[in-house]
């Protein structure tokens, strides 16, 4: 059996690390560390994109890597750090399900994702197709993190991690989306974060806390 | 040219109002830009009537029978809502609920919201469609939280997170679609997300990938439509935001989201050659209808009541698109039109009613007909229209959907009848005392300006009796385009 070329091995290593980071996000309770993990995930995404760009020679992938670097490694984490500092939300409370339980569910999610990715990977012609399962796993794990977290800040980090997973998936299945779309998506993410910043201040002004526990009163009344 | 004006005028309006929206003339500027947009939409429509479907801007934009009437409808309701919001928001500001800064935000975001919806409708690029849908969510999040009450913040947060997650699923679906298209259309990347190109080769797209893509797209955009069980954000966002926003969310945004689903369904069905997408649409549609109909009983807030009614109607429309075929599609398109007009009219009337009585609770609003006959009759007629009373247009479309269901999907008929019956009883029993109940409030000194309500209801009435030939022609063409199993 031929060993994989070095660049693909590197790429697979990136993918594996991404998955590992998703799991550590599930377990992490300090919001500052969560944001660090998010930035690291972004950085891995940049490296992966660069490897693919170098391999395929697609110029728009370099641009996309640059965009990811600016937005997800530098911009958003900085914004989130500032929010954390100004609002003093360093710790998340106990998650809805205990960490070991979450991890076990996470494992099942990964198996499920690989099953889901199987038929698509089989059809893909890209050299990176084997990482598609990991991309789906990252998306679903972030989803899990969103469900199990109570603090607004952690949910947002999970949401951004989901976006990372989506980008990784787009890259491994099709070498990225068309440039117009990628720019549009990046713009939307940026605006979403700005809206969120405003929103956090509104929530805090109103409740003096970012615990989503306060946001559970609007239920169907009997 | 018309297209540039159509998309440009709300954008320019958004920028201008971001600077001057708090001024004394803010509401008028808002209405002016909405009017400009409406004129552009009319001009575009006239061009489509004269020249048939148009592909513009290097094929990035498409105006065909399916979206031409939606563009006009969106621009029209956008205009009437801006007219309604002019006195409404002024009174809200006078009551001290809003500061100048928030009024500016409101006007600016209102225009931006129109722009994103029109972009979503006219774009030919499925990626841009996604971007526009997400932008539409973002532009309305801060509007839902405009009053900064705890409940509105909660509603806004729910809206943001649920729709954000939902729309992320849709992005994954779009990606899968691109993946399938790239194998057929080549890695050019430029054409592989253009709907017209995809439509041309839909028979060759990989069925396994497309069926998976459709699941993600349906869940993603379905969250925006408010299909059960993904509807949780909708009643909250409708109830807590300012009423003009409830009117456009219910009347327009839900339509745009359904439009996105149906565009995708056409592609997937063409590739799969099976009834799977249709069955999924029917299932989600029926579930939403039945669930919403029973939730209607429990509502005590008038805006939540009509928000649930919107979920029910979106269910009907989704079900009809699921059945497919010329008649059901025709009925679904007609229903989209009349629901949008009727529901926004109802929200206008409800908005005034709540403003006069200072409460959104049904039990606190009584005897509207004695307080102000215009509001009372506006609400009563609106409620009768939305409940499908003849001779309003909703009756025509629901009748068509029901008879088609009896022929094509007889098993669904009892469920449809049940949902419609329960909804009728629930809404009528709540609205009747609101309008005719005993009250000791005095009659208002002067009638509120409710022209938009009656204009909308008049159009709905006309559509119930007679559909103009070119509109019917569009419906037929669009119904053929959408096809069915």
Image (spheres, grey):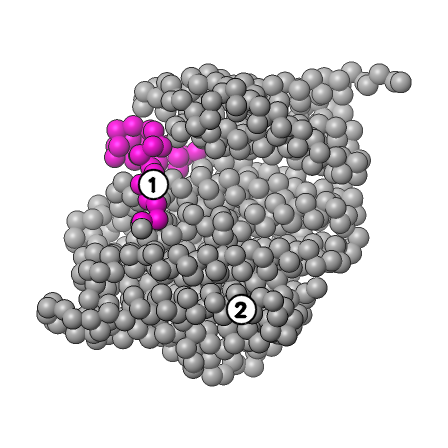
What residue is pinned by disc 1? B154
Residue A115 horizontal side relative to residue A144, left or right: right
| Residue A98 spot, x, y in % from top left | 47, 22
**Foreground pick, B297 / B18:** B297
Q: CA distance from mark 2 to mark 1?
A: 37 Å
In the rendered image, residue A206 lying in the magenta stretch gets the answer yes
The quarter of the displayed image where residue B33 is located: bottom left
Identify the magenta region.
A193-221
Residue located farthest toward the right when viewing the structure as drawn: A1
Residue A222 disc label: none
Mark 2 falls within which chain?
Answer: B
Quick check: do tags 2 and 1 share a chain? yes
| Residue A104 spot, x, y in % from top left | 57, 23
Residue at point 25% right, 56% down? Answer: B360
Secondary structure state at the residue bearing disc 1: helix
Question: Is residue B433 visible in the rendered structure shown here?
Answer: yes
In the rendered image, residue A84 lying in the magenta stretch gets the answer no
**Foreground pick, B246 / B12:** B246
Image quarter of the N terminus of chain A: top right
Secondary structure state at the residue bearing disc 2: helix
Circle 1 Cα neighbour tier, 10 Å, few/some/many (<14 / 14–19 / ≥20) = many
What residue is pinned by disc 2? B414
The quarter of the displayed image where residue B261 is located: bottom right
């Amino acid at each position: 059996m031929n060993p994989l070329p070095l660049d693909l091995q590197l790429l697979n290593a990136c993918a594996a690390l991404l998955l590992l980071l998703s799991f550590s996000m599930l377990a992490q309770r300090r919001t500052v560390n969560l944001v660090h993990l998010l930035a690291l995930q972004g950085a891995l995404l940049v490296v992966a994109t660069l490897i693919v760009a170098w391999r395929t020679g697609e110029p728009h992938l370099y641009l996309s890597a640059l965009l990811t670097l600016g937005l997800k490694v530098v911009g958003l984490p900085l914004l989130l750090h500032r929010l954390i500092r100004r609002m003093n939300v360093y710790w998340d409370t106990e998650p809805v399900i205990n960490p070991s339980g979450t991890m076990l569910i996470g494992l099942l999610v990964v198996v499920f994702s690989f099953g889901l990715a199987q038929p698509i990977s089989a059809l893909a012609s890209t050299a990176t197709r084997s990482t598609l399962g990991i991309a789906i796993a990252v998306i679903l794990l972030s989803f899990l993190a969103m469900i199990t977290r109570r603090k607004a800040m952690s949910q947002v980090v999970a949401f951004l991690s989901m976006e990372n997973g989506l980008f990784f998936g787009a890259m491994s299945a099709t070498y990225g989306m068309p440039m117009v779309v990628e720019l549009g998506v990046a713009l939307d993410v940026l605006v979403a974060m700005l809206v969120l910043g405003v929103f956090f201040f509104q929530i805090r002004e109103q409740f003096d806390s970012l615990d989503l526990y306060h946001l559970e009163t609007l239920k169907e009344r009997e | 040219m018309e297209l540039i004006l159509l998309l440009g005028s709300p954008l320019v309006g958004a920028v201008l109002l971001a600077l001057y929206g708090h001024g004394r003339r803010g509401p008028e500027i808002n209405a002016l830009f909405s009017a400009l947009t409406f004129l552009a939409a009319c001009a575009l429509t006239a061009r489509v009537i004269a020249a048939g479907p148009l592909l513009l801007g290097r094929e990035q934009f498409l105006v065909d029978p399916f979206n031409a009437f939606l563009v006009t409808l969106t621009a029209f309701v956008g205009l009437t809502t801006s007219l309604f919001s002019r006195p409404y928001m002024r009174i809200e500001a006078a009551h001290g609920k809003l500061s100048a800064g928030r009024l500016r935000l409101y006007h600016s975001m209102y225009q931006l919201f129109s722009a994103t919806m029109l972009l979503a409708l006219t774009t030919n690029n499925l990626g841009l469609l996604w971007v526009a849908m997400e932008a539409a969510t973002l532009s309305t999040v801060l509007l839902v939280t405009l009053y900064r009450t705890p409940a509105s913040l909660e509603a806004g947060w729910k809206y943001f997170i649920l729709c954000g997650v939902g729309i992320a699923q849709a992005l994954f679906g779009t990606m899968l679609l691109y993946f399938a298209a790239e194998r057929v259309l080549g890695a050019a990347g430029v054409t592989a997300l253009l709907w017209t190109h995809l439509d041309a080769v839909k028979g060759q797209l990989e069925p396994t990938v497309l069926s998976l893509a459709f699941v993600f797209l349906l869940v993603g955009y379905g969250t925006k439509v408010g299909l059960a069980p993904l509807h949780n954000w909708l009643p909250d966002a409708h109830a807590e935001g300012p009423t003009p926003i409830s009117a456009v969310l219910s009347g327009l945004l839900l339509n745009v989201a359904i439009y996105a689903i149906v565009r995708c369904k056409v592609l997937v069905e063409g590739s799969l050659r099976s009834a799977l997408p249709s069955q999924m649409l029917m299932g989600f549609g029926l579930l939403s209808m039945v669930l919403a109909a029973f939730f209607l009983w429990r509502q005590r807030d008038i805006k939540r009541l009509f928000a649930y009614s919107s979920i029910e109607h979106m269910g009907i429309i989704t079900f009809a698109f699921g059945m497919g075929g010329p008649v059901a599609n025709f009925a679904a398109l007609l229903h989209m039109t009349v629901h949008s007009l009727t529901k926004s009219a109802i929200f206008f009337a409800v908005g005034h009613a709540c403003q006069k009585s200072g409460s959104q609770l049904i039990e606190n609003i009584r005897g509207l007909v004695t307080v102000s006959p215009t509001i009372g009759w506006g609400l009563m007629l609106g409620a009768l229209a939305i409940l499908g009373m003849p001779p309003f247009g909703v009756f025509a479309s629901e009748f068509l959907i029901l008879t088609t269901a009896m022929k094509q999907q007889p098993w669904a008929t009892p469920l449809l009848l049940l949902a419609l019956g329960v909804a009728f009883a629930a809404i009528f029993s709540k609205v009747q005392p609101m309008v005719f109940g005993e009250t000791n409030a005095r009659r208002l000194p002067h009638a509120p300006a409710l022209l938009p309500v009656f204009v909308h209801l008049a159009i709905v009435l006309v559509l119930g009796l007679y559909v103009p030939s070119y509109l019917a022609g569009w419906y037929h063409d669009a119904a053929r385009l959408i096809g069915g199993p």
